[in-house]
Image (cartoon, rainbow, N blue to C red):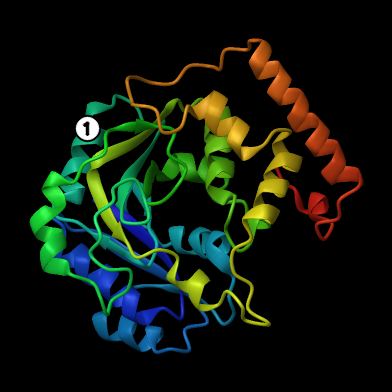
Amino acid sequence: MFSIIIPTFNNIRYLKKCVESIKKNSTYDHQIIPHVNEGSDGTINFLDQEKIEYTYTSYNSGICTGMNMAVKKSKYNYILYAHDDFYFCPKWDVVLKKEVEKLSHNKFYLSGTMVNNGQIELDCGNNLETFNEKKLLKEINNANFYDFQGSTWAPHLIHKDLWNKVGGFSEEFFPGTGSDPDLNMKLWNEGVRVFKGINDFKVYHFGSIVTRKYKNHPTIKTESGSRGGKIFLLKWGFTINFFKKYFLKSDTKYISELTDPKKNIKFFLELILCKFNYLYIKYIYNINNCHKLIKK
């Protein structure tokens, strides 16, 4: 059915729970392909024991490189990107399969709804020690958001042909922040207008476990939203927020496929502000010469 790609960085306990939830709460058979960054915590032994295929780098290559490597091993037509600290809720794949079957084309980006640290507030614990799985399974069907426009985050599903056409994740966004909206922008330029967040496709999110664990580590680089946002601005000429507001109409209720943005006075005023920010970052602000890394 789906090839589920899960980048992971020394996060074996959460990866085990993620894999367990997929096996436990899926209706169909799926291919699970983690990308192991370093794996010094026993991740490789676990995957070998479970006979799960994976890709590997001996260092933290980040989300983008890991995703691009792992996708090459996919055997199904649909690529599902997931974090290793997700718990997949029951019937997630039934819901997603129905959504795919509603569409008469493959130009779409479908994403799930995150419970805890996301759209739905249902506190069942922020770590494995406090995780109340019984409560989650009992209450999840009554915890709802709505189908929404303009999702730019995992878990998300796209067709493999589309993924390959746009070149997957752009690796200049190492370790990952900014890569999701960048992918959306590339998809937009390929004519994709279905960017739909699906209420009934639910995952419980423990919330950036690796980022929290290594936040103050002297040598390990984790997420830097500021850098990713600047790279996006230099690459596309406007900010992530501008793109989400005017192109994706993010977080509004999903009604139909998106159309091109209305270019009114407010649009152009905000675009001009983006251009000022662009010029400032490109010619004055130094972010490790990141403009030299931009690849469209």
Q: Nearer the viewer, residue 19 or 152?
A: 152
Q: Nearer the viewer, residue 155 or 132?
A: 132
Which of the 4 quarters of the picture holds residue 246?
top right
Outermost top residue: 264
Residue at horizontal 12 percent and vertical 47 percent from the top: 141
From the top left corner, tell me how far across and down residue 36 is, in percent.
46, 75
Residue at horizontal 74 percent and vertical 33 percent from the top: 237
Residue density around tag 1, few if under 14, some if 14–19, many if 20 or more, within 10 Å: few
Total numbered badges shown on the rendered structure? 1
From the top left corner, tell me how far across and down residue 257 is, in percent.
39, 21
Outermost left residue: 138
Mark 1 lies on residue? 101
Residue at horizontal 27 percent and vertical 80 percent from the top: 129
Reply above or below: 257 against 106.
above
User: Quarter of the image containing the C terminus?
Assistant: top right
Q: Is residue 94 left or right of residue 72?
A: left
From the top left corner, tell me how far across and down residue 46 is, in percent.
31, 85
Q: Nearer the viewer, residue 163 or 277?
A: 277
Residue at horizontal 59 percent and vertical 69 percent from the top: 222
User: As shown in the figure, which amino acid type bears the numbered disc 1?
Assistant: Glu
> SS for tag 1?
helix
Question: Is residue 190 among the parts visible in the rendering?
Answer: no
Question: Is residue 263 among the parts visible in the rendering?
Answer: yes
